[in-house]
Amino acid sequence: MGIITVKTLWDEGAKALSLTVIAGEQYLDRKLPETAMNRPGLALTGFFQYFANQRLQIFGLAEFTYLKSLSDKDKNKRLTELFEQQIPGVVVTRNRKVPPEIIDLAEQYKVPVMRTPMVTMNFVNECTVILEKLTAPQERIQGTTMELMGIGVLLRGDPGIGKSETALSLIERGYSLVSDDVTEVRRTSRGRLVSWASEVTRYHMEIRGLGIIHVPSLFGVAAIRRQTELDLVIDLKKPTGNEDRTGIYPEMVEILGVEIPCITLPVRSGRDMANIVEVAALNQKLKELGHDAAKELDDKIIDRLTRGRVRHG
Amino acid sequence: MAETEMVKKFKVLNEYGIHARPAALLVKAAGKYECDIFIEKDGNKVSCKSIMGLMTIEGYPGSIMTVSTSGADAAEAMAEIEELFVNKFYED
């Protein structure tokens, strides 16, 4: 993703962050080169050798208290120096009255100034989450996402292989739909994958022969989930005879640079795919708890076989 | 359809014997053929198409296994299974 503007943040977070524009509304399209925030306290003391001028500048209680301690002349000088650094935007927290000097400078240097009733710490936390979401690597993937007991499963496969039918059976078993056929995936800063549905088609499914259905209307709100972390990818394929038979050497796929376990399931008519996906998810949960059944059985067999060699040899 | 029957004995040559990985290789190879394939050791006879069966017959390293195939493609199946035994299941 390229550089975002202050407007991007405004569009996404104005409501959640209770932001209002105090000055420079027409300059909201200023670029926000670093998607982070800076408390300009140190800069206001006149120290500009290291100043994060590419970040959103947050004026909180500390900044205002310090400004109050300055003479009008010094206050004006320091604020002018700050705005000369081509800062992308200013946010005033705690609904503090914005000093007229800042409003004048905002117009002069074409910088948007916003205000929020939030306490600085809460604002910074919330805003960090929103900025991270805006800049996280993101991809649209062909596949259906389900959430089973806290395990996020992405079902992939050629059109018509039965992704939606499998999802429907899983919903009937009490699990939740996240997205049908088209899944948005983003990578979090912790290196996890999160998937959700596109806004327009969210919570709808297309079932061949039936057409489009609205899942929460038919199955209740428990049948849907807004988003889930992905733990497992399941590829539905026509049988090749070359499927994994032990599960000891799991395949991995890479999505947005994150390695994630991948199981290939052969689809035969009459095979209860939902049941198998359910077991696969449970088994993945078990593995994440550190209990790899296939590996443990193999270790046990190897131990018996090699001790047998001593006994027989 | 010509029915062929074959019986051969093989020694388990790899270090760990018939554990999950070799068992999976045998099952995959056997699954490609129509014919019946059995493996026998010490009076225990299991289908070579069953991974759970193969893991229970205790194919110790150095033990002797009797493989029998019967059906139209018995010879081809035997050849492929022989290859796995001879090549130590591509382990070591």
Image (cartoon, rainbow, N blue to C red):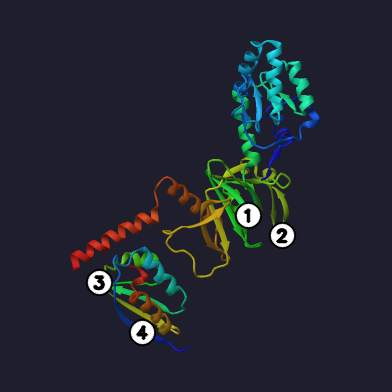
How far separated are the C-alphas under marks 2 and 4?
Answer: 51 Å
Query: Residue A209 has which mark?
Result: 2
Q: SS at mark 1?
A: loop
Q: Residue A80, relative to residue A271: is it above or below?
A: above
Q: Position of residue A162 (x, y in %)?
A: 62, 60
Name the foreground residue: A248 vs A161.
A248
When asked about the image quadrant of residue B72, the answer is bottom left
User: Number of marks in the image?
Assistant: 4
For badge 1, the amino acid type reads Gly
- Which residue, given by chain and number where applicable, does mark 3 sit on? B62
| Residue drawn at the location 72% of the way across and 34% of the way down | A6
For badge 4, the amino acid type reads Met
Residues at marks 3 and 2 on the same chain? no
For badge 3, the amino acid type reads Gly
Name the foreground residue: A162 vs B17.
B17
- Which residue, given by chain and number where applicable, does mark 1 sit on? A143
Q: SS at mark 4?
A: strand
Instruction: Identify the subunit bearing mark 3.
Output: B
How far separated are the C-alphas under marks 3 and 2?
Answer: 58 Å
**In the picture, which quadrant includes the N terminus of chain A?**
top right
Q: Mark 1 against mark 4, which lies toward the viewer? A: 1
Q: SS at mark 3?
A: loop
Q: Mark 2 against mark 4, which lies toward the viewer? A: 4
**In the picture, which quadrant includes the C terminus of chain A?**
bottom left
Q: In the rendered structure, are the residues bearing label 2 and label 1 in contact, judged by CB atoms less than 8 Å apart?
A: no
How far separated are the C-alphas under marks 1 and 4?
Answer: 47 Å
How far separated are the C-alphas under marks 1 and 3?
Answer: 48 Å
Q: Position of residue B39 (x, y in %)?
A: 34, 74
- Which residue, given by chain and number where applicable, does mark 4 sit on? B6
How far separated are the C-alphas under marks 2 and 1?
Answer: 19 Å
Instruction: Identify the subunit bearing mark 1.
Output: A
